[in-house]
């Protein structure tokens, strides 16, 4: 039996650990053979394959990125199910393990509905996929963001400055919530909760009045209560000026202007996504990779592996699609008790 593996969408620490675990489990225990599709669905529609045996996966679980490469190509822009079936036939591929986020799983669902044998592995550093408690990559991103804020704090303390750290999270604030709590930020700002500038200033001044250098953790998708999507569509920032930087860069001058505290913003960006995965992410990714082989053996087409509590389960793609897993209000309220 020959299995094709692909990684699609934004990369994520732990992708290589999934690939390694699937290849080792499948080849050691079940006499399976594997090939890799290069650069996600693009490698499928272009029939761009690479060998994927034990030599190729040796020692890769600690490597960031993906040895297969990734892209945001949609297979339906390149021939759809007919083309995928043709490439699989021509290369003797029985089924596909698709490792990716919402976009990848949505395409995988459509292909499965049209008869292609696919199992999924969920991936996103944002931890916003429904139907799974955690995705690998999230823990690593939180650790990097936390360590970065610990560093921002010592330089902020030395100069009596307010430090604003912008972390990833276009639609949800999981990374901001967890790293902000871990770093003891004086305010955490997330997309799920619009907040007023007055409230932010109150938190900043309260920290300053206690002799602390204020530390603000803001998710990239956060909006002030005065903002709506039209702001960014019109190219305007939070204060109606031409938009130059991300939300962290927009907030910093306003905080400085209103409080008189010298303020600096740092955007962590893709540093949160690159580099070696944490031990937790390697273990989760390895368990997902192993479970994806079970999915194939049991014919769970149209299902993805997921974490529920401590158990790995197999859930239909549709459970993960259509609605993001946002930060519940209670989790934000809990964290906000310590703001200011
Ligand atoms: O979806 C994961 C994510 O890391 C988001 O948090 C971020 O906004 C986005 O990817 C960045 O994507 P790109 O690499 O395409 O700039």
Image (spheres, rainbow, N blue to C red):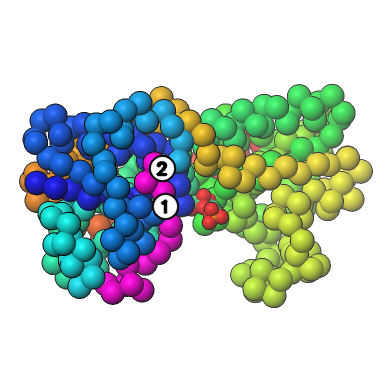
- Compared across the picture, whether 257 is left or right of 43 comes to right
The residue that label 2 is drawn on is 66
Q: In terms of image quadrants, where is residue 205? A: top right
Residue lying at 56% horizontally and 40% vertically, measured from the top left: 272
- Residue extent of the magenta highlight: 66-81
Closer-to-camera residue (9/305): 9
The verdict on residue 104 being magenta is no
Q: Secondary structure at mark 2?
A: loop
Say if 286 sits above or below 114 in the image: above
Badge 1 is on which residue? 70
* Beta carbon of the mark 2 residue lies under 8 A of ligand 1: no
Q: Is residue 73 magenta?
A: yes
Alpha carbon distance from label 2 to label 1: 7 Å
Q: Is residue 212 left or right of residue 336?
A: right
* Residue at image location 20% in from the left, 73% down from the top: 82
Q: Position of residue 217 (x, y in %)?
A: 66, 41
Q: Position of residue 40 (x, y in %)?
A: 36, 56
Residue 235 image offset from top left, x and y in percent: 71, 71
Total marks drawn?
A: 2
Which quadrant, please, contains the C terminus? top right
Q: Is mark 1 within 8 Å of ligand 1?
A: no
Magenta stretch: dominant SS? loop
């Amino acid at each position: 039996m020959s299995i094709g593996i692909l990684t699609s969408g934004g990369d994520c620490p732990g992708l290589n650990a999934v690939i390694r675990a699937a290849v080792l489990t499948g080849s050691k225990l079940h006499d399976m053979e594997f090939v890799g599709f290069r650069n996600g669905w693009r490698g499928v529609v272009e029939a761009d394959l690479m060998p994927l045996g034990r030599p190729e996966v040796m020692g890769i679980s600690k490597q960031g990125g993906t040895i297969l490469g990734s892209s945001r190509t949609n297979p339906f822009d390149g021939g759809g199910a007919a083309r995928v079936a043709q490439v699989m036939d021509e290369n003797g591929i029985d089924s596909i393990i698709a490792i990716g986020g919402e976009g990848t799983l949505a395409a995988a669902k459509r292909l499965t509905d049209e008869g292609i044998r696919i199992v999924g592995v969920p991936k996103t550093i944002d931890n916003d996929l429904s139907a799974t408690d955690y995705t690998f990559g999230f823990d690593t991103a939180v650790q990097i963001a936390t360590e970065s804020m610990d560093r921002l704090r010592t330089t902020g303390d030395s100069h009596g400055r307010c430090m604003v750290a912008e972390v990833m999270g276009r639609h949800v604030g999981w990374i901001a919530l967890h790293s902000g709590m871990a770093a003891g930020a004086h305010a955490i700002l997330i997309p799920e909760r619009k907040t007023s500038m007055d409230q932010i200033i109150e938190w900043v001044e309260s920290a300053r009045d206690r002799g602390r250098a204020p530390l603000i953790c803001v998710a990239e998708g956060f909006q002030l209560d005065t903002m709506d999507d039209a702001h960014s569509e019109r190219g305007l920032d939070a204060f109606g000026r031409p938009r130059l930087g991300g939300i962290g860069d927009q907030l910093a001058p306003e905080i400085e202007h209103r409080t008189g505290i010298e303020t600096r913003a740092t955007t962590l960006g893709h540093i949160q996504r690159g580099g070696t995965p944490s031990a937790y992410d390697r273990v989760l990714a390895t368990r997902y990779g192993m479970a994806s082989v079970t999915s194939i053996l049991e014919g769970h087409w149209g299902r993805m592996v997921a974490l529920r509590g401590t158990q790995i389960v197999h859930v239909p793609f549709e459970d993960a699609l259509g609605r993001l897993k946002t930060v519940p209000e209670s989790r934000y309220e809990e964290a906000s008790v310590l703001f200011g």
